[in-house]
Image (spheres, rainbow, N blue to C red):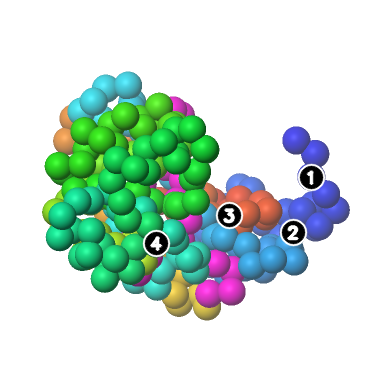
Amino acid sequence: MKHGKKYAEAAKLVDRSTLYDTADAIALVKKTATAKFDETVEVHIKTGCDGRHAEQQVRGAVVLPNGTGKTVKVLVFAKGDKIAEAEAAGADHVGGDELIPRIQNDGWLDFDVVVATPDMMGVVGRLGKILGPKGLMPNPKAGTVTMDVTKAVNDIKAGKIEYRLDKANIIHVPVGKVSFDEAKLQENVDALMEAIVKARPSALKGQYLRSITLATTMGPGVKVNTAKY
């Protein structure tokens, strides 16, 4: 992949052979962000897990203390009094069966997170082929299948993010924006890493955290020393 001049200049600031302390890595990714928009700061964690084995799956959610800096649109599938509860909590879209054709036939996907009450999962299941590949399927482990829709919506709006292994056993998570000050980014990274360390599968033998890389949307990766975690 060919990178532009700005990227090449930014990459010169990063020593590829150094494992940086988290604070130094954060300062460096802020310095190497050269795009004209407020770039997202991302953490990429390579694990020693083998996601093909169910007992080595890593999946969950964590509320970042300082949010992600992104406005998140929440869709809630509910019925009865849970509809009013979801609306009162600030959900952007609330509904039931009537939303299925909008998503299936009209390609409507104007939402970032889907929450469902357990009694609506039969309905939501019909959207598996559309929501699944986009990582939008509600999941009890992520707290998005719940009767407590108020807490679910509030947490998501406050900066709750999901983490899970991809096919290469890497976790990719946003932890804020370049415009955040370093202390806020540090708090978010620490909260994320604490959750991921706790989520270590008991079936895993050997090294769990192979590498941690911090990067901005358009910037070079900065390797973080895993020893702290």
57 lies above or below 145:
above
Sequence order check, earlier mark of 1 and 3: 1
Mark 3 = which residue?
A: 215
Q: Secondary structure at mark 2?
A: helix
Dot 3, crowdedness within 10 Å: few (<14), some or many (≥20)? Answer: many
In depth, the one of 93 and 170 nearer the eye is 93
Type of amino acid at the residue the image marks with label 3: Ala
Q: Secondary structure at mark 4?
A: loop
In depth, the one of 116 and 34 nearer the eye is 116
Q: Please report the bounds of the magenta region as a residue range.
A: 158-180
Sequence order check, earlier mark of 2 and 1: 1
Does residue 58 appear in the picture of this structure?
Answer: no
Residue plotted at (44% across, 39% down): 103
Q: Secondary structure at mark 1?
A: loop
Mark 1 = which residue?
A: 3
Residue plotted at (43% across, 59% down): 73
Mark 4 = which residue?
A: 92
Q: Quadrant of residue 59?
A: top left
Left or right: where 7 falls relative to 164: right
Type of amino acid at the residue the image marks with label 1: His
Type of amino acid at the residue the image marks with label 2: Ala
Q: Is residue 212 magenta?
A: no
Q: Quadrant of residue 202?
A: top left
Circle number at residue 10: 2
Q: Measure the alpha-carbon separation of dots 3 and 4.
A: 30 Å
